[in-house]
Amino acid sequence: MATSLSQRPVDSSHRRALAPIATPDRLLLGPGPSNAHPTVLQALSRTPIGHLDPLYVELMSEVQELLRYAWQTDNRLTLPMSGTGSAAMEATLANTVEPGDTVLVAVKGYFGHRLADMAGRYRADVRVIERPWGEAFSLEELEAALIEHRPAILAMVHAETSTGICQPMEGVGDLCRKHDCLLLLDTVTSLGGVPLYLDAWKVDLAYSCSQKGLSCPPGLGPFTMGPRAEAKLASRSSKVPNWYLDVSLLNQYWGSDRVYHHTAPVNMNFGMREALRLLAEEGLEQAWARHRRNAEALWAGLERLGLVLHAPEALRLPTLTTVRIPDGVDGKAFSQHLLNNHGIEVGGGLGTLAGKIWRIGLMGYNSNPENVDRLLNLFETELPRFKSAAAAAA
Amino acid sequence: MATSLSQRPVDSSHRRALAPIATPDRLLLGPGPSNAHPTVLQALSRTPIGHLDPLYVELMSEVQELLRYAWQTDNRLTLPMSGTGSAAMEATLANTVEPGDTVLVAVKGYFGHRLADMAGRYRADVRVIERPWGEAFSLEELEAALIEHRPAILAMVHAETSTGICQPMEGVGDLCRKHDCLLLLDTVTSLGGVPLYLDAWKVDLAYSCSQKGLSCPPGLGPFTMGPRAEAKLASRSSKVPNWYLDVSLLNQYWGSDRVYHHTAPVNMNFGMREALRLLAEEGLEQAWARHRRNAEALWAGLERLGLVLHAPEALRLPTLTTVRIPDGVDGKAFSQHLLNNHGIEVGGGLGTLAGKIWRIGLMGYNSNPENVDRLLNLFETELPRFKSAAAAAA
């Protein structure tokens, strides 16, 4: 039974002769992924090194430190999970939820529902409060819910990618401390593009992604956990019910011990290090101001064309703009036209907003005046044809 | 509370001014990651496209089809998990284990223990049979254990990366059908490099990684599930207790519906497509024969130098060779010398073999005669210095 003797005939029915990959250079102005910075793509294509190589271990520390800067946190346990943002989202719950814990999810869009679904899988007693898709929660509503449900964790989304709404966070952390619960925050569409102060806001758990404000391709999920969440993890009565995302194991690799856990996605981390390096080089204030400035130019331009923005101005995300599709226009046909004839991706609506809005991202490397002008020009010159087609068909 | 008004001062204590990344071109002859093929690295650095872009959807189908070829399976549910091999490993258990199910793990090295740890987290009744690190299981031992434990799943490792042992698989699947259990197989160090016939061997669940026989950087975890495992998933009484790895959700994205689940790591999949394209171009028989040929040259050369191979010849993996560290030699000092002065990574032992063996990988792109010669030369010229140093110190 030696391997050399176990040869059988090979079945070639699934063998295919493909040409080398030839994907086009799209401009990704949807909800993400966004375009990656050219030097990030260069970093990604370097020769891999070992995940326990001293040079890689040094790179890990750099990535961790720059993530702390981007998030404005001193959290020791700050690292990119070896999966996408959804994996990091799940990690926040998997590590801290014990069966029967009450998790209160403040839902105001698609990703709030995802948090609720995930928390249930970790056998939480999930409670949900909801706002319509396009609104935010007030401190009063949140405090009333904390009093009513007495949760162990309040989970909410800072930048709702499905609605374009930025949840004001000043004061929420104080309420959570007052009512003795952890604050878990989704920062997927805010990290790197929207003012974010995890420690000042008293956020205990947060996650994000690589492919939006950080200008890196998708594949890593930044994760952070503060001391109060660490204490909850340390007091668990059983193992974390998810091996891959178990922070008590991951901390032995990302902490000073450097004990092997899993083979790290080293090339993605090359890209992440370069993305964070560029953000630190620009400076957070400058990056936030740039996102704000370009978003304001987009908003003004869209309104000049008679389009209606879905989010009220005070709550608008600088990274993701939601625009209502005008009556009689087939929104999907227009975005397919942009993709197929102009190489530009713009997103459609999710859930209750499906067919009702477009979602335009100006994130990271893509947040620049040239992209704003290019897109506004296309809305000005091309959209009327889709309006008249709709009118003619009516 | 608009975002423009919520500015606080930025804390720059974690801001660091780093130089651009400058990692060296190592030759990775350890247990993985292995070097990636140059055109795979080029594919990785392409401009991302959207995870719902029609061109990406087409690429997904190509990746799935070529994975079926590489694994010799017709399984519909064949896809790369958006994490490393350990995530795919966890996916096989997370989807199929229900609380109380008996999972029998045949442990003959480090990664068998990992399977047992993971299965326990999904509340399986975990039973373990063990062989010393450097041996394989016989059909008689396996059948006796199936009769004794009556498991729902038998989990085992085809190519044990910690020992260099290839588990003979002919007949194991028949035993599992006879005793009505699923067969779950780790093919992390065999896919692309060692003869592997999932369907002929009646394997129900398998996983692998991107960074070994496939010549792609780490970051994706090929996963496959046959009809019997699908039936077990379909009959679950509750949701899969892991959202990110839930195949019933992932199948809506990777299947014909293409429903959004998570933002796919598109660039890693560009690399995976290129890696699988190269394997199909070479042909499985040719790739397996190449791995065998180069491994045999390495074995002969090492034995010529008086070194002892840890695995008996009939069970030796062509992808990973385990060599006993000679008495009196500091194995770690020699491998650090190779890394620091020659840019070559060679692995050390894990678990009971720590400090006792080196692990030499010749996988994917790295399995070529030039690498064999280069390494044998270094063992011939450099190792004696480490022997005499040890002798002098004694």
Image (cartoon, coloured by chain):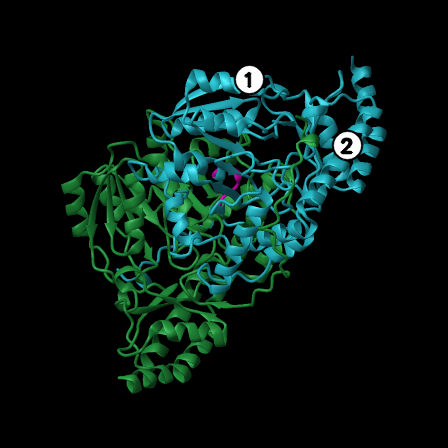
Chain colours: A green, B cyan
Q: Which residue is disc 2 drawn over?
A: B296
Q: In this view, does A271 lie above or below A126?
A: below
* Residue A69, percent from left and from top: 46, 49
The residue lying at 42 percent from left, 23 percent from top is B151
Amino acid marked by disc 2: Glu
* Whether residue B229 can be seen here: yes
- Whether label 2 touches label 1, CB < 8 Å: no
Q: Which of marks 2 and 1 is nearer the N terminus?
A: 1
Task: Give left or right: position of A115 versus A223.
Answer: left
Residue B86 shown in magenta: yes
The residue lying at 30 percent from left, 55 percent from top is A110
Q: Which residue is disc 1 drawn over?
A: B140
Q: Is residue B75 above or below residue A276?
A: above
Tell which of A21 and B314 is nearer to you.
B314
* Bounds of the magenta segment: B82-87
Task: Give left or right: position of A364 versus A151.
Answer: right
Give neighbour class at mark 2: few <14, some 14-19, many 20+ (Cα, 10 Å). some
